[in-house]
Image: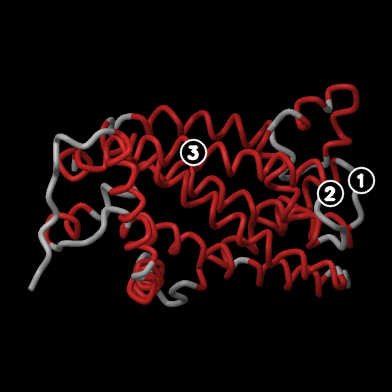
Amino acid sequence: METVDSYDASLGFRGSAGVAWRDLVAGANMWRIWTVLGWRDFYHQTNRTVLGPAWSVVGLVIMVGSLGFVYGSLLSTPARVGYPFTAAGLIAWFFISGCLQGGFTTFVNSAGTMKERTLPVSFGLYRYTWRLFVEFCLKFSVFAFFAVFSQFNPGLSLLYLVPMLVLYFCNGLWVNLLFGIIGGRARDMAQLVNPLMLIAFLATPVLWPSSALGANAFISTYNPLSHFIDIIREPLLGNAPPFGSLVLVFAVTIMGWSAAFFVFARTRNNIVFWL
């Protein structure tokens, strides 16, 4: 028998929080489905093309090759260091920007499924975040290509990547949850964030090292995105993730999930009506 989701208007915040928590758990338990659908979403975005999902890798190879050469020349950085540095920074940035910009469509894109099937509201959240994560992991092949090209060996520091990837996925979930709710309610928010992301990209040490700022290094130090970049880039460059960056990322993770869960508990029953 199919279960019908119901809304009890007499529930206080504690009751709504319990419903929201059960929704998130129920969505997570359906991982066998949303992992397959998330991969299919990634695959079908390049449907009827010659290279298929490989275009994501090829495009990044071209970008790293061109930007690595230009910024390497400007900053007098040897190719052995410059290309891996640029590749690692762009790989991390594309996942971050995918969540911050694309997160507004998390629930909008799954509106048809939510209206036709009795599924946890969070199902679309996991599906979209997994799609981004699949593309994120695939792009590490670009770093491997340039590491071989530059004869660069990061060594055993690559083992740090495993917990860092878990951290990225957890942060992607809360960002897509919070932004997905906002984007479902106010569709024009994405138009406001898109130009801001260009400013954020220019102010974040993705293509250039923080040391290049000199006395203005505080721009990088107080930019949370810089620390998210560092916990992925440093292991790829043969170093341990900076302790300060780890502390800040953990703090952002806790605060972000707290805010996202609070908003989700308050708005869960309204989301499907906004789509």
Disc number lying in front (1 or 3): 3
Q: Which residue is mark 1?
A: 76
In the displayed structure, would residue 130 be above or below residue 241?
below
On the rendered structure, is 94 left or right of 88?
left
Q: Is residue 79 above or below residue 193?
A: below
Image quadrant in which you'd find residue 10:
top left
Query: Quadrant where the C terminus lies?
Result: top left
Name the residue beneath numbered marker 3.
258
Position of 131 with respect to 15 (left or right) is right
- Kindly report which numbered mark, 2 or 3, lies closer to the viewer in this rendering: 3
- Mark 2: which amino acid? Gly
- For badge 1, the amino acid type reads Ser
Q: Say few, some or many: other residues with alpha carbon within 10 Å of mark 1 (under 14 / 14 to 19 / 20 or more).
A: few
Q: Quadrant of the N terminus?
A: bottom left
Q: Nearer the viewer, residue 213 or 150?
A: 213
Residue appearing at x 20%, y 52% in the figure: 111
From the top left corner, tell me how far across and down residue 202 is, in percent. 66, 33
Q: Residues within 10 Å of mark 2 (few under 14, many from 20)?
A: many
